């Protein structure tokens, strides 16, 4: 049975790498990408996603637009540090031109619900940005979302400090209210947070191994990855964490996780600790635990797989 997969992205650099990595797996069919605000605006996330799919030779995969701002807000602009980390356009300032096709007219939330009803247990929903699209889908049709076989989200930090504050990881911090709504839904899901993504590092020398491939796709991916992972350092061997790509691996090869815990989580939605993911004290003794939080992974094996699979997928792009 070929599993179906939806990727929900706020397409910045590590989302781009995660997208390419997911396309290297023949045992799963990526049926769509849904987009949201986050690393960039919704408009840029959609533009980047379409361009990357086309660049990688998958122009048949549709893109559906979702949330443009956090719950309770009417607009969103990326903060300056995001533009520094991901580039002004979100993909390391690599110019892929204007998209040659438009996103689908159907909204992301309706497509997620439709796919949940159609594919049920065969569907994997992967999120690597704020949880708005998932939260909105649960709010509109929780019964449909409960049919999904597996939901895996890159987000949170349970045992380590955050990366945008001492408490919070970026995806949760950008819209803690939607994340809290998802957590409160009691729909089982796996959280791939900083606890494990900070253990999976890629170096400039690893990225350079894609350069001899010589395709337009490999050249672009080398440029955007170098911007994200080595731009802040003179030493290309420092590198950085593969947040979103690791979550793809967990979704498709859960055995990469060597330690996890089941827990009921809550999200701090206000104050200094806004975005913090922590155990829900009110549900401490409840037998049912909705969240599986990854605590350790085989980082050496994953990094090796990632580099090798990227070499394969980039050799088949434009």
Image (cartoon, rainbow, N blue to C red):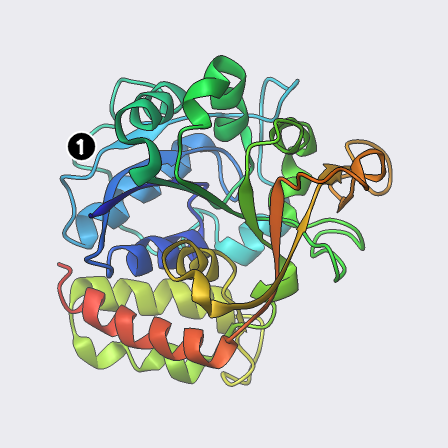
Q: Residues within 10 Å of mark 1 (few under 14, many from 20)?
A: few
Quadrant in the rendering for residue 227? bottom left
Q: Quadrant of the C terminus?
A: bottom left
Q: For this rendering, which residue is in front, 154 or 76?
A: 154
Q: Who's the residue at 39% across and 39% down the image?
A: 149
- Image spot of residue 73 (x, y percent): 64, 19
Q: Is residue 69 above or below residue 287?
A: above
**Would residue 217 be seen by someone viewing this image from the given angle?**
yes
- Image spot of residue 45 (x, y percent): 40, 38
- Image spot of residue 12 (x, y percent): 45, 50
- Image spot of residue 257 (x, y percent): 52, 66
Q: Is residue 82 above or below residue 318?
A: above
Judged from the image, the secondary structure of the residue bearing numbered disc 1 is loop
Residue at far top of view = 140
**Would residue 97 be seen by someone viewing this image from the given angle?**
no
Q: Who's the residue at 47% across and 22% down the image?
A: 137
Q: For this rendering, which residue is in front, 44 or 6?
A: 6
Q: Who's the residue at 15% across and 42% down the image?
A: 59
């Amino acid at each position: 049975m070929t599993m179906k997969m939806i990727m929900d992205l706020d397409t910045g650099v590590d989302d781009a790498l995660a997208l390419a990595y997911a396309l290297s797996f023949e045992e799963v069919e990526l049926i769509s990408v849904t987009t949201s605000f986050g690393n960039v605006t919704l408009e840029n996330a959609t533009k980047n996603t379409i361009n990357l799919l086309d660049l990688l030779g998958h122009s048949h995969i549709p893109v559906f637009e979702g949330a443009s701002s956090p719950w309770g807000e009417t607009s969103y602009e990326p903060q300056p540090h995001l533009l520094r980390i991901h580039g002004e356009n979100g993909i390391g300032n690599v110019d892929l031109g204007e998209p040659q096709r438009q996103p689908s007219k159907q909204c992301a939330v309706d497509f997620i619900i439709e796919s949940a009803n159609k594919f049920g247990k065969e569907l994997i929903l992967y999120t690597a940005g704020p949880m708005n699209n998932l939260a909105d889908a649960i709010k509109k049709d929780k019964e449909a979302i409960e049919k999904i076989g597996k939901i895996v989200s890159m987000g949170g930090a349970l045992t380590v400090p955050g990366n945008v504050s001492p408490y919070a990881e970026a995806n949760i911090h950008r819209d803690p209210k939607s994340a809290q709504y998802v957590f409160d839904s009691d729909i089982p899901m796996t959280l791939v947070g900083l606890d494990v993504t900070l253990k999976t590092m890629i170096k400039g020398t690893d990225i350079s191994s894609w350069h001899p491939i010589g395709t337009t796709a490999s050249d672009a991916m080398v440029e955007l990855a170098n911007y994200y992972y080595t731009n802040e350092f003179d030493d290309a061997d420092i590198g950085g964490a593969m947040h979103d790509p690791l979550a793809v691996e967990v979704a498709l090869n859960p055995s990469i996780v060597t330690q996890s815990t089941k827990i009921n989580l809550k999200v701090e939605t206000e104050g200094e600790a806004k975005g913090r993911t922590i155990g829900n004290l009110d549900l401490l003794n409840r037998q049912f635990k909705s969240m599986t939080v990854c605590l350790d992974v085989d980082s050496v094996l994953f990094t090796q797989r990632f580099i090798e699979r990227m070499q394969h997928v980039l050799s088949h792009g434009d």
